[in-house]
Amino acid sequence: MAEPADIRDLDGYPVTPDTVLAAYRLRCFPMCEHRAAPIAWYRPLRRAIITWDRYRVPRSLAKVLRNRRPFRLTVDRDFAAVIAACAERPDTWIGRDIEALYCELHRRGHAHSVEAWDGDGKLVGGLYGLAVGGCFSGESMFHRVDDAAKACVVHLVALLQDLGYSVLDCQQQSAHMARFGAYEVSDAEYARLLAEAPPPRPWPRAG
């Protein structure tokens, strides 16, 4: 399968899907200053993660999902639409190069999405991320109606647990992910978790 068009990072080095996977194994991830900016690499000293011993569903969200079941949730149904929607904001770190690379990583079976659809079949929320060993690195999410992205997080965690993943990497702590039990660890602790995570089972077919 063809590589995305020639992509180079901020220092002029070529970036391919394999480069991205290798970077994640070294605990680095790419970001851009804006849609047209080149890729820069980051490895934070502290990492926000969710492990299953601390994971929780916010009470108000649990009530909404239990009582109304407002969304139809799918996996890998429309990865390209999800990442495009995540980038659709005034300030975004998802540059066009990142979008192209992750779409290719999805085609190769490494990047995955969860989608939320309303009763009319419209895409109203979603998230995407990258599977690296026994860790899933959540990259971004979006919502067009209340609770759609949060419902995708719940669906994602249930899937990760079922497949044998042990860590959901949130990269940077936020109040939103803290509500799900995200907490910070040092880079050294994150490296240990990556090394010790057992290999998961394959992802299910799209749908």
Image: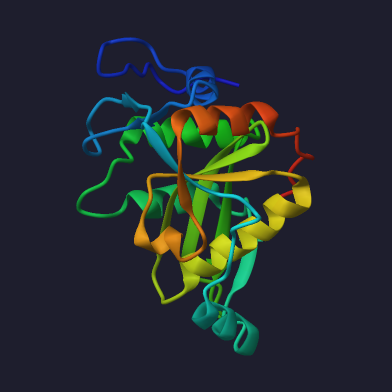
Q: Closer to the camera, 158 or 37? A: 158
Q: Is residue 15 visible?
A: yes
Q: Is residue 207 visible?
A: no
Instruction: Indicate left or right for 165 with 63 as reference.
Output: right
Q: Is residue 33 above or below residue 175?
A: above
Q: Closer to the camera, 100 or 68? A: 68
Where residue 13 appears, x then y in whole percent?
Answer: 34, 10
Instruction: Indicate left or right for 140 with 128 as reference.
Output: left
For the N terminus, the quadrant is top right
Q: Closer to the camera, 8 or 185? A: 185
Q: Is residue 56 above or below residue 105?
A: below
Residue at (44, 60) in percent of width and height: 178
Where residue 91 appears, x then y in whole percent?
Answer: 21, 49
Where residue 60 appears, x then y in whole percent?
Answer: 50, 82
Where residue 180 appears, x then y in whole percent?
Answer: 51, 63
Instruction: Indicate left or right for 193 with 141 as reference.
Output: right
Q: Closer to the camera, 45 or 135? A: 45
Residue at (55, 23) in percent of width and height: 25
